[in-house]
Amino acid sequence: MEVNLISDTITRPTQGMLDAMMSATVGDDVFKEDPTVNEFEERVAQLFGKEAALFFPSGTMANQTAIKVHTQPGEQLICDHFAHIFNYEGGGISFNSGVSCKLIEGTRGMITAEQVEAAINPPDFYHSPLTSLVEIENTTNKGGGACYDFSELQRIRAVCDKHNLSYHLDGARLWNAVVAKGENFLQYGNLFDSISVCFSKGLGCPVGSVVVGSKDFIHKALRVRKIFGGGMRQAGYFAAAGIYALDNHIESLAIDHQKASEIGAILATKSSIQKVEQVETNIVIFELNTECISEQKFNKFLDDHQIRIIAMGGGKLRMVTHRDYTDSMHEYLISVLERLD
């Protein structure tokens, strides 16, 4: 049996999602004439209580567009040193926006209001970059699917208001955070100036992310998306997948979380595993006890059992549960992990 846990991006559309895609009514979205895209954007905007939304082909483009709209060249944004926008978006912040990052060493990818305030450059000190944006990631990818305490996000909002800073949320896996914490999407929409959410991870769509914000923000984002080459034509086929996911795939994320928790619990009992990060959602990050087993030997052990995972660097390994990770796959993986010393 092959088990692929490298990411939740490997998910494929369900039959119900494919049926919705194939029956979608489409038009030319570059002219804003695709009715299914328009419906999808309206649905996501309403979900977060925002005025407008814009559909993107990727989460990276969605985040990079938001940063471009919020900042000017030469300015600086604040984010955690684990942030996806800094580590995994190809240096786009500097290339696309001419903006630098003030990196904060938070806890599992999460920063505090006190850290944010301490990182703000004095606005009248023209020798340093002007701080203009605070970026948050929830859940944190490199932090092991960790979820922010919402009260801390509110405190960071207060710091942003005090210093006239914009506030963007990379919510690629925000669906997971909301399900895990029993929260709602409106509270996030009320807090952040802009939010990006991904549909091609836990929700199982083949393509796409959406950015929500004010009408003025989305109007500006539309122009930036065009510049970045993100205009799509009959994108309603993909938007239909997003609508189907909103209606059918959010609540089931709790199943992914439970499976990840069980994987983490098994790993924590093994002497060959040095550390397992706290498991809150669908990501399990762990480190090997190299006195017991080398990374090469561990990977061969998994390869021999047709189990695929991914390295995060710095000796950290990651497993990500997802919709296509079935109960039988889970039972098989647990049985294999039980054989570890």
Image (cartoon, grey):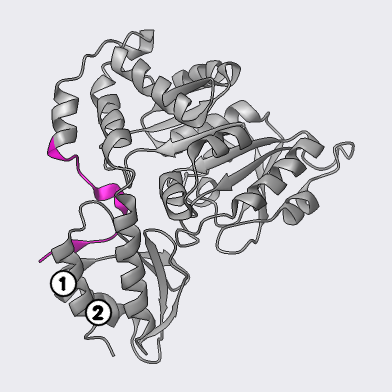
Q: How many marks?
A: 2
Q: Is residue 52 magenta?
A: no
Q: Residues within 10 Å of mark 1 (few under 14, many from 20)?
A: some
> Circle 1 sits on which residue?
332
C-beta proximity under 8 Å, tags 1 and 2: no
Residue 59 tag number: none
Q: Which numbered disc flags the more N-terminal residue, 1 or 2?
A: 1
Q: Amino acid at mark 2?
A: Leu
Q: Nearer the viewer, residue 322 or 90?
A: 322
Picture coordinates of residue 264, whole percent (x, y): 36, 73
> Circle 2 sits on which residue?
337
Question: In the rendered view of the protein, which quadrant contains the N terminus?
Answer: bottom left
Q: Nearer the viewer, residue 91 or 312?
A: 312
Q: In the drawing, does residue 18 fall left or right of residue 60?
A: left
- Report the residue at 15% width, 35% height from top: 16
Choose top left, top right, bottom left or bottom right for residue 318. bottom left
- Report the residue at 24% width, 51% height from top: 323
- Report the residue at 20% width, 72% height from top: 333
Q: Nearer the viewer, residue 153 or 95?
A: 153
Please provide the residue range marked out in magenta: 1-15
Asked whether residue 161 appears in the rendered view, the answer is yes
Choose top left, top right, bottom left or bottom right for residue 154. top right
- Report the residue at 60% width, 50% height from top: 150
Residue 160, relative to residue 276: is it above or below?
above
Q: Secondary structure at mark 2?
A: helix
